[in-house]
Amino acid sequence: MPRLMAIDYGKKRTGLAVTDPLQLIASGLTTIATHELIPFLKKYFSTEPVETIIIGEPKHLDGNATDATPLVIECIRILKKNFPEIPVVKVDERFTSKMAFQTMIDSGLKKKDRRNKALVDEISATIILQEYLQNKI
């Protein structure tokens, strides 16, 4: 069974998470430099089948678009162009960074390790994917 992949897209870094092949468990995959996203995905998709890409859609608390929303819309366009056979689904990503930071605290990471923004992005992607899985059921 193909995996699901979540993307926490950012201007500098992009967090990635995937499910297991049974699509039951979301796990952080990696964080990469955003300019390396498409080459990374081409390589990954050549070895791992992915059924759907889930991408976090940034919104303000009131539901309006943020400054980052146009970047995500452009990313979606590029994903659809490069991988037309894989559907791209947007999900609300409000609070994922805060939830990721809280997850780091709850798991006992030291303060120094919690400053690792790449880890926050990877955990955020995992949270996006886990929420998608929960809402899919």
Image (cartoon, rainbow, N blue to C red):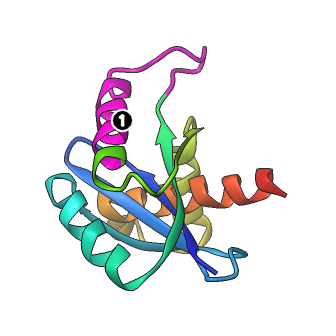
Residue 110: name its quadrant.
Answer: bottom left
Compared with residue 117, is residue 21 higher up or lower down, i.e. above or below?
Answer: below
Q: Is residue 130 left or right of residue 87?
A: right
Residue 76 in magenta stretch: yes
Which residue shows up at 24% across the image and 69% down it?
Answer: 40
Position in image of residue 23 (x %, y %):
68, 74
Q: Which residues are magenta?
A: 59-79
Which residue shows up at 52% across the image and 14% down it?
Answer: 64
Identify which residue, 23 or 111, lies in the foreground: 23
Position in image of residue 15 (x %, y %):
37, 59
Viewport quadrant of the C terminus: bottom right
Q: Which residue is mark 1?
A: 72
Viewport quadrant of the N terminus: bottom right
Amino acid tagged 1:
Val
Residue 83 in magenta stretch: no
Q: Residue furthest left?
A: 35
Compared with residue 126, is residue 132 higher up or lower down, i.e. above or below?
Answer: above
- At label 1, counting other C-alpha atoms closer than 10 Å, the crowd grade (few under 14, some 14-19, many 20 or more) is many
Q: Residue furthest right?
A: 137
Which residue shows up at 38% across the image and 26% down it?
Answer: 69
Position in image of residue 38 (x %, y %):
23, 59
Quick check: can you spot residue 109?
no
Dot 1: element? helix
Residue 24: name its quadrant.
Answer: bottom right
Q: Is residue 59 left or right of residue 127?
A: left
Quick check: can you spot residue 87?
yes
